[in-house]
Image (spheres, grey):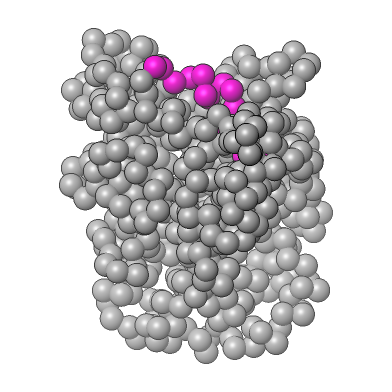
Amino acid sequence: MYAKNIITAAALIFVTVAGTSCKDFLESKPISQIGETDFFKTESDFNQALVGAYSAFAQVYSGNGYYPLLVDLRSDNTTELTAGGDGNDAKRNIDEFRETTDNEHLTAFWQTSYILIARANSILARIEGATIGDNLKKQYSGEALTLRSLAYFNLVRLYGGVPLVTEPVTDIDASYNVGRSTVPEVYAQIEADLAKAEELVPVSYDGSAVGRATKGAAQSLLGEVYLTQKKYSEAAAEFKKVVNSGTYSLLPVYADLYKAGQQGNPEAIWQAQYKSASNSLGSNLPNHFAPTGSEGITIQSGGAYGFNQPTEDIAAAYSAGDVRRNNIADGYTNGSTFVAAKYIRGYVERETGSGNADSGADWYVIRYADILLMYAEALNEVNKGPVDDAYKAINLVRKRANLSDLSGLTYETFKTAVYNEERLESPFEGHRWFDLLRTDRALTVMNSKVSGGTKSTVGISTPIKSYQLLYPIPALAVITSTPAIAQNEGY
């Protein structure tokens, strides 16, 4: 499906930064002899190349990228240390802020992200000169720009300034000398790419194309990019485009978000989509999130590893009557014995497939509810207090959760309310850690929940320091590219 062989050369561009060794590159040469120059000619060629880029996109969220572990385990919402977690060292160290520069998941995420970037770059470098229809040329360019922007947005938030590569790099020796761009430089590139992309991609797709990057996805992503940089007016303007478009709406029932067959639902602005029983096109979310020992009970087969389980902290954060609390299961029954091991129903109890990484469970990259809450946040900042549209946005989300409307709040109390709502609405979709970083609360919130030396329900037992708000650059990238790539402070 993903035409991996066709774009092997693109995947191997920027070898050092992507973490692929020279030995791997040489061994793959017979596959890549198809040649990118010879390949990129027809509409079908470019479409296949984009499918390859979407393959890397899917791997970021479920597969080699381990995105949920890097962002959810890092927060106070999930942990590996509850009953039912298997205690894998690489994951435990992320959970406890004790990771080292050779952590396998940090390296894998770096690799997978740069593979996605390389594939997008190969498309963008050749499509202008291609003899294909203008409409498709615009669409494919916009999709590639959006995919590349998402990859860089994740990278800059996790690692800080990273190597900014926007053209194919075919010289292996030269790739060792590509250094880190500054954080502002990375954000400037992301902004420029998304501003262009939103003018190029369509509003929607039909049939099998559902799930590709749309205008709403580009606008939503750009709004979050602006919000992260505290460019509140610009963020509000982008979110308003999405809200006013009429393209998206909340599903009436919260639990329906996580039922089978929800690909392309009205609330899904962008999903990483997966398919079971389809030759390695499934996700590993149920296997990773199901409590250890629950194979054959919560999931059919393929292993249950307990890598990403709800904390007691998030479970206790919901008020009485909030229907979203039901997405957290408090345990499962093994025969006649109840096993107290919290897990996320939305990933474990649906589309589990038959074996490891064979689930059809998708990953929400952006939901309309997320946009409504960030829109409310941005409006509150712009106006130094909540206006009618801010109340309308947050109350739509609260109404579905079976909560009463908010009113009469000040700038500060509304800010607290929207931060809380952002946490409770999508606690297991990769937002919480980035929300804490964006709002400058990560140190305060996490250190307020330190256990004092005993096992912590949020995964940390000692206070974290400011340098730990970024991950270390993977050792492989630093070692092979010194002095071009310097390690982050503290590591």
Is 66 left, or right, of 364 in this rendering?
A: right
Residue plotted at (34% across, 43% down) = 256
Q: Position of residue 479 (x, y in %)?
A: 81, 54
Q: Position of residue 364 (x, y in %)?
A: 43, 48
Question: Magenta-highlighted stretch: main secondary structure?
Answer: loop
- For the record, the magenta segment spans 306-320
Is 71 left, or right, of 221 in this rendering?
A: right
Q: Position of residue 57 (x, y in %)?
A: 51, 60
Q: Is residue 104 above or below residue 397?
A: below
Locate the C terminus and report the quarter of the image it occupies.
top right
Q: Answer with the quarter of the image where residue 307 lies.
A: top right
User: Can see residue 180?
Assistant: no
Q: Position of residue 358 (x, y in %)?
A: 56, 61
User: Can see residue 249?
Assistant: yes
Q: Nearer the viewer, residue 171 or 79?
A: 79
Q: Is residue 277 above or below residue 262?
A: below
Q: Is residue 86 magenta?
A: no
Residue plotted at (76% across, 38% down) = 87
Q: Nearer the viewer, residue 412 or 391?
A: 391
Q: Answer with the quarter of the image where residue 425 lies.
A: top left
Is 264 left, or right, of 120 in this rendering?
A: left
Residue plotted at (48% across, 58% down) = 360
